Image: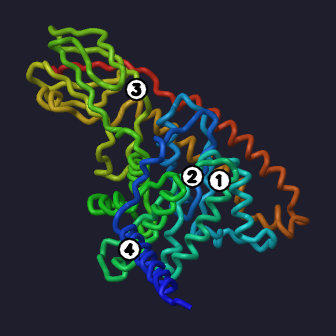
Amino acid sequence: MNKKPAIWRYGFILLLALLRTASFAQGLATPVSQTSVEPFTLKNGDRVVFLGNSLMENDLLYGYLELALTTRWPDRTVTFRNIGWSGDTVFGDARSYFTNPPTPYELLMKQITEAQPTVVFVAYGGIEAQEGEAGLARFNEGLNKLLDKIQELGAKTVLLSPIPSLSTHGSENTTRRNAELERYASALATTAAERGTYFVDIFKPIHELQKKFSLTDNDIHLNETGYFHLAMALENGLGLPPRQEVATIDLSKQNAASSATFKILKTDPKNAELTFTVEERYLPLPLPTEKGASVNSERVLRITGLKKGYYTLAADDEQIVTASAKEWADGVPIRQGPSFAQASQLRTMIVKKNELFFHQYRPHNRTYILGFRSYEQGRHAEGLKELGLIVTWLEGQISLHRMPLPHTYRLSRLR
């Protein structure tokens, strides 16, 4: 028998293997393009689920991710559910109770199904990356199985990369840890490209921002400032336009240029006063309490044609900021006012709603109310259902406050 054809086939197979290895190595260094994925948007009636490890769960304390998406489409009713779980993996390893069944993985599947999602933000890989390259194949297998389940439910998926290790000490362990996290981020990008779904790289922007801001209190988990910047990184990764807007009012031409709707009501050159209204497309993100947290997020107002002097801007008779004529011509950041107050109130309601939902779907005494010892306190199960009524009421309040309100602004010269 002629052996040459067999040898040729073996050589061809070896060549394919080498090419695949090269492609994989390239994927570790270069994010995968997703030109086939249509622009991201939320539709009226969507149900958004945040799923993952502590990166998702801890936003319950701050509400920035939900607030960002809520304010982007204020005219649409969208329901949000956060079922993140600290320490969780694509196999639901952290979701264990004494009650068995369900197994942790069965509980994960059950919670996703009961949330009835149409959009799922999936943030895994941070825990699994501790296994290094040896655990990558198992992670990919579990990830695709999870995504198959979400697809069966008819929901679209947005994959998020892990965030970097936030230690500022620059130790060898931190460098090694970040290399593994990047490896898993690349695997997530590859999976997203193969499945034609969304992928948002938050590793790189958070890694850069930690050089400028204090994003964590313990080198591991994001703090309030961290989630503020995470929300903006998510919006940017989804291709949404930046929140920073520059509006210009030219007094010499009596006109205004902005994506928001400006209307000049009155100009009084003699008393150096200007009155105008603004109808914003969406509310701003309220800034975190830490100083220096804002970057490319605030609204900027430019007013040209002012005479020398200092001018104070007020909204609905509430003073906002005072600046010189030159500063107004260059552009003054607006970081407070009625729109920020409204956004802060909205965020407070989101945090409270999510807190109540957390206690409903994850009660601390679940074993006694719903588990194998429910014969002792099972009567309280009805109370968990009643929490759902309050959650629904709060969602109604959120819908009433998510639309920006028009405000009247007055610029007057200091005497």
Tell me the SS state at disc 1.
Answer: helix
Q: How much space separates mark 2 and mark 1, taking CA atoms?
A: 8 Å
Amino acid under disc 4: Ala
Disc 2 crowd, CA 10 A, few/some/many (<14, 14-19, 20+): many
Of the two numbered discs 3 and 1 in the rendering, the one whose residue sits closer to the viewer = 1
Q: CA distance from mark 2 to mark 3?
A: 30 Å
In primary-sequence order, the first of circles 3 and 4 is 4
Query: Which residue in the protein does label 3 denote?
Result: 280
Q: Earlier in the sequence, mark 3 or mark 1?
A: 1
In terms of depth relative to the viewer, which is nearer, 112 or 174? 112
> Which three-letter amino acid code belongs to the residue tagged 1?
Gln
Q: Residue furthest right?
A: 375
Instruction: Tell me where residue 373 sits by quadrant.
Output: bottom right
Whether the residues at callouts 3 and 1 have beta carbons within 8 Å, the answer is no
Q: In this rendering, would 95 be left or right of 332?
A: right
Q: SS class of the residue under badge 2?
A: strand
Query: Which circle's residue, 4 or 1, is located before the other in the chain?
Result: 4
| Label 4–label 1 contact, CB within 8 A | no
As drawn, the label of residue 176 is none
Give the alpha-carbon distance from disc 4 to disc 2, as whole Å.
28 Å
Q: Are marks 2 and 1 in contact (CB under 8 Å)?
A: yes
Q: Secondary structure at mark 3?
A: loop
Let me know if residue 288 appears in the view: no
* Image disc number at residue 151: 1
